[in-house]
Image (tube, rainbow, N blue to C red):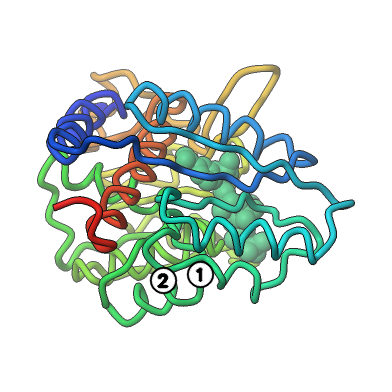
Amino acid sequence: MIISGEQIISRLKDELNDALASYKGTPHISVVLNIEDNPSRSYIKSITKVARDNGFRITLYEVDSNTSEEELEEIVKVLATDDDVDGIIITRPYVVRMKREIINRVPKWKDIDGQTDANIAALYKKEDGLFPATPLAVMEFFKEVNYKLTGKHVVIVGRSTTVGLPLFHMLLSEDATCTVCHSKTENLKEFTNKADVVISAAGHPGLITEDMVQNATFLIDVAINIVEGKIVGDMAINFEEKEYKEKGLMFITPVPGGVGPVTSYMLLLNTIKGMRKRGKLP
Ligand code: NAP
């Protein structure tokens, strides 16, 4: 079964509508955008559309390598203290002067992509917090089909602080057994072939082929790569229904139209959660 982002989004939209049904204001997300980074610009472009379509307001603060440390600090300070701002995203890669101290000025319940030390620590310590949107989106795919992760062996390909590492903690919390692979992993195939679930977030088109996922029942492709003008993931797996059923595969996610679109909704839901914690929503 191919699980599209669209089918998950219809459930998430209901959650958003319920949360905002009695709210008189407009939830407001501010983005500190590094305009020198093209992937960040397209990431924010799609988030902006989803946010506006769902009745959120988005304000962009464009920064680049000429922006001084003082200017950056001032922007974050203003956003942190303005009660009208409900969520703050600082795009990665950060501009050169963006120090951890500046990022950590974002209040815990406005940090809607889980970037601050407070939220990273909360995830690692299994405390309440706002966690990175992409790994949260991945977890929605398991929830969607009621896939029980307890005791399952999950191989994550990629160890970034935005995807692989937070995902590792989320999956451990669901009692999965996790292996995290990366570019220095020797013989990746040996690991992926032992997995019940393979999640790829390497950004390397064609990295995962059918012969590498012989025992998997769930494949999640997080990657967004552009090849000859087309969006592709990391997995070169035949998604034809007959083929994957014969291989015993139960669930797969497409690229495009899989994890990517769900990620934007997780940012909106994190904003709602933060507003509740700040007493702006019941
Ligand atoms: P990243 O910071 O570049 O991390 C990539 C990770 O993959 C690193 O840990 C790297 O290992 C590992 N890796 C790279 N090539 C590999 C290989 N050949 N074999 C095994 N591991 C390999 O990237 P990221 O920000 O995590 O993003 C990863 C992918 O997800 C990208 O395609 C990105 O576009 C996509 N993404 C999608 C969403 C979404 O919403 N769907 C959101 C964010 C990112 P080392 O640590 O050893 O370098």
Instruction: Residue at 47%, 60% (x, y): give it.
Output: 164
Instruction: Residue at 70%, 18% (x, y): give it.
Output: 228
Tag 1: residue type?
Thr
**Above/below status of 259 relative to 147:** above
Q: Position of residue 247 (x, y in %)?
A: 26, 34
Which dot marks residue 21?
none
Residue extending farthest to the bottom is 125
Residue nearer the viewer, 259 or 11: 11
Q: Position of residue 160 (x, y in %)?
A: 56, 61
Q: Is residue 196 left or right of residue 45?
A: left
Q: Secondary structure at mark 1?
A: loop
Q: Position of residue 211 (x, y in %)?
A: 44, 42
Residue nearer the viewer, 242 or 26: 26
Residue extending farthest to the right is 66
Q: Gap between marks 2 and 1, in whole Å?
A: 5 Å
- Count residues near mark 2 (Cα–Cα under 10 Å), then give few for <14, some for 14-19, many for 20+: many
Q: Is residue 184 left or right of residue 118?
A: right
Q: Secondary structure at mark 2?
A: helix
Instruction: Residue at 48%, 56% (x, y): give it.
Output: 82
Q: Position of residue 86 (x, y in %)?
A: 40, 50
Asked whether the residues under the numbered discs 2 and 1 touch, taking CB atoms below 8 Å apart as contact, a structural biologist would say: yes
Q: Is residue 137 left or right of residue 85?
A: left
- Count residues near mark 1 (Cα–Cα under 10 Å), then give few for <14, some for 14-19, many for 20+: many
Residue 26, located in which quarter of the rendered image?
Answer: top left
Residue nearer the viewer, 70 or 235: 70
Tag 2: residue type?
Asn
Q: Which residue is mark 1?
A: 116
Q: Which residue is mark 2?
A: 119
The N terminus, quarter of image: top left
Q: Is residue 208 visible?
A: no
Residue 192, located in which quarter of the rendered image?
Answer: bottom left
